[in-house]
Image (tube, rainbow, N blue to C red):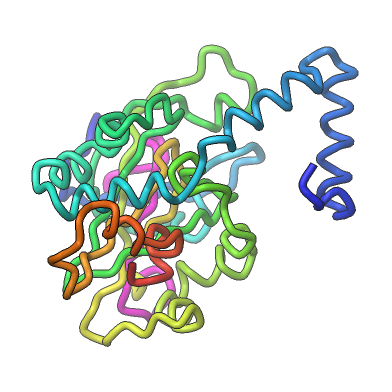
Amino acid sequence: MTGHDDLPTAARARQLEERLIAAGLTSDDEIDEFLTRLLALASPVNGARMVARAWTDPHYRDLLLFDGTAAAAELGFERLGYALRVVANTEATHNVIVCTLCSCYPVSLLGPSPGWYKSFAYRSRTVREPRVVLAEFGLMLPDEVAISVWDSTSEARYMVLPARPTGTDGLAADGLAALVTRNGLIGTALV
Amino acid sequence: MSYPAGSTVRVRTGDPDHHTRAPRYVRGHTGVIIAALGHWAVPDDSARGIDPPRVETCYAVRFSAADLWGSGDHTVTVDLWESYLDRP
C-alpha cells in the first residue's frame, strides 16, 4: 500500500477489511477498485482549476457559488458523490472548513485530506478559536476580517473560493490555477 | 414544516444513544437558517439500518461564537436536519 502499513490504524483497518471479506460483504479486489477510483483522479489541481475559472469568468463564479456540484460537472468533475458547496472569501470575510464529527472533505477536488485535517486538535479548536488556529498556519488575519467557520456535518462538502490576489491581471487561467493551494481551498491559507 | 432563510431556530437538546449528526456543541443553542441544502436521508436512521430512513430537508444553520462559547467574534455554520431543529 502506501507505507502506512505499520501504523496501528492501518492494522485496525485491515482487521475490519478481513471481517467484511469473511462475512462475504466485499472482496480485496472490490476494495482496491474502489480506492483506485476514489484516488486516481483526486487532486487539489481540480479545485484550483475551478477557482481559476471563477476568477476569470463571472458567470462561472455565480454558478460555482449557487450550485457547486453543477460547476464541478461543467469542468468534467462529475458524479462527485456529494453536494459541493463553495463559499467565497471577500475583503470582509474569510472562510475556513472543518468537520468536527469525523473528517468529511471533498477528496476528488482537493486530493486526500492532510493528516492535520483529521486531527482532534484541528477539529476541536477550529470551531472554538479559528483566529488562533489560522495564525498557527501562518495566516494572520486583520481583526476587521470576520471569520466564518463551516462544520461539514451533512452530505454537503465545502470548498473555499479564495480572493484573487492583486497583481495577477496578466495571468491566464493556467497561471492562476498554479497559485491556488490545497490549504487555500480549505481556508487555512489565503490562496 | 420548513424554515425559510433568515428564520431563527433552536437545536433540540437530548443525547440519543445512537449515531446522530447534531454536534453536542450546538445542542440547545439558537442559530439562523442560512440556506436549505437538500433533502437527504436522516443519518440517525440510516446508521441504524432503518429502511426506509426518514428523508428531510437539511439546513445550513449559523451560530455566533459568543453564543456557543461565551467569547469569540467568529461564526460557525453547521448543517442540521430538520428534526434536529425547533422553533425557539
- To which quarter of the image does residue B74 belong? bottom left
The answer to whether A103 is drawn above or below residue B48 in the figure is below
The answer to whether A181 is drawn above or below residue A48 in the figure is below
Residue positioned 18% across, 48% down in the render = B7
Residue positioned 68% across, 23% down in the render = A33
Q: Nearer the viewer, residue A25 or A72?
A: A72
Decide if residue A5 is on the left or right side of residue A173: right
Which contiguous range is marked in magenta?
A: B67-88
The answer to whether B77 is drawn above or below residue A26 in the figure is below
Residue A44 picture location, percent across and down: 45, 51
* Residue B88 seen from this side: no
Residue B56 picture location, percent across and down: 37, 27
Residue B55 picture location, percent across and down: 40, 22
Residue positioned 39% across, 37% down in the render = B81
Q: Nearer the viewer, residue B22 or A180?
A: A180
Residue A86 picture location, percent across and down: 29, 48
* Residue B60 seen from this side: yes
User: Magenta segment: does it hold B72?
Assistant: yes
Decide if residue B2 is on the left or right side of residue A7: left
User: Magenta segment: does it hold B80?
Assistant: yes
| Quarter of the N terminus of chain B within the rendering | top left
Residue positioned 88% across, 45% down in the render = A11
Decide if residue B29 is on the left or right side of residue A9: left
Decide if residue A181 is on the left or right side of residue A10: left
